[in-house]
Amino acid sequence: MEEKDFFNETTEQRTHRLTCPRCGQEAEYKVGWVVRRKKNQLPRGADERDRAKFAKAQSYMVRRDDKLACANIRCRKPFEITTLQTIAFLMD
């Protein structure tokens, strides 16, 4: 079994306060995340190794967006997101 069989996958937009490194203006930006939530039960056809992996599996989010455009009308330059983690574990 693959890891994707243990999770339900959805995409979400979450707002974060980020600062543009060029103009220094702070604003709220919508950042795309892929959310993988652990299923309630182990899928059928799993062996002992799959059961052990499923027991250790944990829900998590992966950041989908790497760059954003500045919200300042005068700047509008693209910048990389460096202040947010790329992976965040969820507490269920």
Image: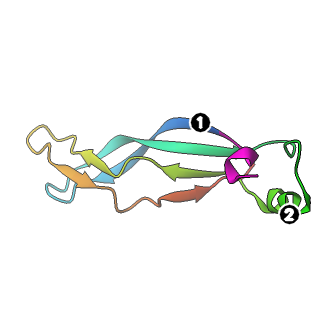
Circle 2 or circle 1, nearest the eye: 2
> Taking 50 as reference, is 5 left or right?
left
Q: How is the image coloured?
A: rainbow
> Taking 58 as reference, is 86 left or right?
left
Q: Amino acid at mark 1?
A: Thr
State how many labels appear.
Answer: 2
Q: Which residues are magenta?
A: 1-8
Q: Position of residue 22 (x, y in %)?
A: 14, 58
Q: Secondary structure at mark 1?
A: strand
Q: Amino acid at mark 2?
A: Arg
Residue 2 marker: none
Q: Position of residue 19 (x, y in %)?
A: 27, 54
Q: CA distance from mark 2 to mark 1?
A: 26 Å
* Residue 68, magenta (yes or no): no
**Residue at the disc numbered 1:** 10
2 or 1: tag closer to the N-terminus: 1
**Residue at the disc numbered 2:** 49
The front one of 58 and 44 is: 44
Residue visible at 34% across and 62% down in the picture: 82
Residue visible at 53% across and 58% down in the picture: 87
Q: Position of residue 31 (x, y in %)?
A: 41, 43
Q: Residues within 10 Å of mark 1 (few under 14, many from 20)?
A: few
Residue visible at 64% across and 45% down in the picture: 36
> Taking 83 as reference, is 35 left or right?
right
Q: Secondary structure at mark 2?
A: helix
> Taking 46 as reference, is 60 left or right?
left
Q: Position of residue 91 (x, y in %)?
A: 71, 53
* Residue 4, magenta (yes or no): yes
- Direction right: furthest residue: 48
The front one of 90 and 51 is: 51
Residue visible at 21% across and 45% down in the picture: 70
Q: Are marks 2 and 1 in contact (CB under 8 Å)?
A: no
